[in-house]
Image (cartoon, coloured by chain):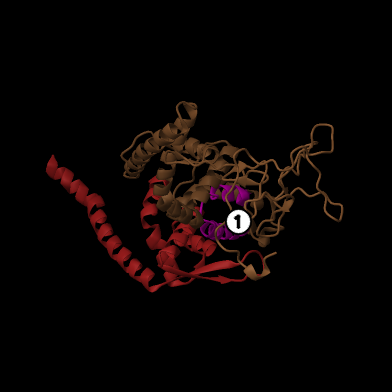
Chain colours: A red, B brown
């Protein structure tokens, strides 16, 4: 899969990924980026994560608070809200259904069988 | 940019400035929140030992991605010249500000008033530009009739425009601006024309200038003759008004042949009647008893007011 494809895919699930990350533990922007990358989403864009955090915050799925930092600017931490948790549950259900459907479609053995039947 | 940006590495500061200009059209609160986050990110990137532009890509692309993922509209005028872009961004920001929106809403409510005014201005322009033909009253009637028609047309156009049923919006805006520019000249011209003619609704009010001196029904008097109750002409009668003001005649430009009448204090008086004239080059009044031809009032029949003090 090319990186373009991955970033396209990521766009659709970034909300869920960010919500899940913050659900585990509150985090500031850069921290969320690092944790997403650490979880395997290596080509997640900094700007996408920051923008997504901002949008989820504006939509009421996240809350935020500022923690002063001795070195550099203050860090704005994000935490999940009740609404964010509902949104995450919904996203998880959607994802599981989606994954199941795609697994079935992409299953190599079943593709082979289908092709055999067709010929 | 917050005070914390002071002392930032040049690369971070430059990157932040570029992102800021890409977000210039956003509402100040939204923009400042985003920029604070970007600033924090840049500091982290810098601390990791990365160049912002290498790690994050060009500022414009970074800003575009940030806007898209934050659910914000794409930036305006990406390809415009910097000065023009600055102007457009400033205008867009102004248009998006709550103050401007409130002003715009208020202006829209007042628009019907403007529709009436512009009809009047158009009528005034038509009248003044066709020149002073016909009498003032005719022009005033024509102007008022034209204004009535144009106001109706203008209001109809305004309503149609509001319902978005009219093409050529830029042309209509240009005409509106032109009429607005004519508002003051047309109004002042109309006021001065009306003031000079004192004519309203077709009839003229003549305001005569006050007659100098003593006058009867507006006609200046040259002389006054006083007769006593027996019908005898009196000489050197001094006349005063209700406020004690002398009823002077000819004080401004005394006739050189006028008999000079002086009071005991030596002051010449001009309210002593009848006025008599010397014969030319003499100090003599030839006919001291002269009265206007045929003037001989009969004696009074009514008894005197105070008969006990009759002289």
Looking at the image, which residue is at 49% across and 46% down? B75
- A82 left or right, relative to B58: left
Q: Is residue A34 above or below residue B172?
A: below
Q: Which residues are magenta?
A: B15-44
Residue A63 in percent (x, y) is at: 46, 70
Magenta stretch prevailing secondary structure: helix
Question: Could you tell me residue B129's position as x and y percent?
Answer: 49, 28
Res. B51 visible in picture: no
- Label 1, on which residue? B42
Could you tell me which quadrant the N terminus of chain B lies in? bottom right
Q: Residue furthest bottom?
A: A82
Q: Residue at x 66, y 41 (%)?
A: B291
Residue drawn at (42%, 32%), measured in percent from left and top? B138
Q: Position of residue B65 (x, y in %)?
A: 47, 49
In the depicted view, which residue is nearer to us: B140 or B54? B140
Q: Is B188 in front, or is B108?
A: B188
The subunit letter for the residue under badge 1 reads B
Q: Nearer the viewer, residue A106 or B270?
A: B270
Residue B218 shows in the view? yes
Q: Quadrant of the C terminus of chain B?
A: bottom right
Q: Is residue B28 a member of the stretch shown in magenta?
A: yes
Residue extending furthest right?
A: B266
Label 1: few (<14), some (14–19) or many (≥20) C-alpha neighbours in 10 Å: many
Q: Is residue B183 shown above or below B227?
A: above
């Amino acid at each position: 899969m090319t990186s373009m494809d991955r970033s396209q895919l990521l766009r659709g699930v970034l909300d869920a990924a960010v919500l899940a990350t913050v659900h585990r533990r509150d985090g500031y922007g850069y921290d969320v980026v690092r944790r997403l990358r650490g979880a395997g989403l290596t080509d997640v864009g900094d700007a996408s994560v920051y923008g997504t955090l901002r949008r989820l915050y504006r939509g009421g799925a996240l809350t935020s608070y500022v923690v002063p930092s001795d070195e550099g600017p203050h860090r704005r931490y994000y935490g999940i809200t009740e609404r964010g948790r509902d949104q995450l549950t919904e996203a998880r259900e959607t994802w599981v259904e989606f994954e199941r459907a795609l697994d079935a479609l992409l299953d190599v053995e079943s593709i082979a069988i289908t092709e055999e039947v067709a010929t | 940019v917050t005070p914390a940006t002071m002392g930032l590495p040049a690369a971070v500061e430059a990157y932040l400035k570029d992102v800021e200009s890409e977000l210039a059209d956003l509402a100040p609160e939204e923009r400042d929140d985003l920029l604070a986050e970007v600033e924090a990110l840049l500091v982290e990137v810098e601390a990791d030992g990365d160049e912002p532009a290498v790690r994050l890509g060009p500022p414009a692309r970074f800003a575009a991605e940030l806007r898209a993922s934050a659910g914000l509209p794409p930036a305006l005028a990406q390809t415009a010249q910097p000065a023009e872009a600055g102007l457009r961004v400033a205008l867009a920001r102004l248009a998006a500000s709550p103050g401007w929106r409130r002003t715009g809403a208020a202006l829209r409510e007042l628009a019907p008033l403007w529709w009436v005014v512009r009809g009047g201005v158009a009528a005034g322009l038509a009248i003044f530009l066709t020149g002073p033909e016909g009498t003032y009253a005719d022009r005033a009637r024509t102007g008022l009739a034209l204004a009535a028609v144009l106001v109706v047309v203008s209001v109809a156009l305004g309503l149609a425009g509001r319902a978005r049923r009219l093409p050529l919006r830029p042309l209509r805006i240009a005409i509106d601006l032109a009429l607005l520019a004519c508002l003051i000249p047309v109004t002042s011209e109309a006021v001065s024309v009306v003031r000079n003619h004192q004519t309203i609704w077709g009839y003229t009010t003549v305001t005569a200038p006050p007659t100098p001196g003593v006058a009867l029904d507006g006609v200046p008097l040259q002389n006054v003759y006083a007769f006593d109750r027996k019908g005898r002409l009196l000489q050197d009668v001094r006349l005063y008004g209700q406020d004690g003001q002398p009823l002077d005649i000819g004080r401004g430009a005394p006739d050189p042949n006028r008999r000079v009448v002086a009071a005991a204090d030596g002051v010449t008086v001009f309210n002593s009647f009848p006025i008599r004239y010397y014969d030319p080059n003499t100090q003599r009044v030839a006919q001291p008893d002269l009265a206007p031809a045929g003037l001989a009032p009969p004696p009074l029949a009514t008894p005197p007011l105070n008969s006990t003090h009759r002289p």
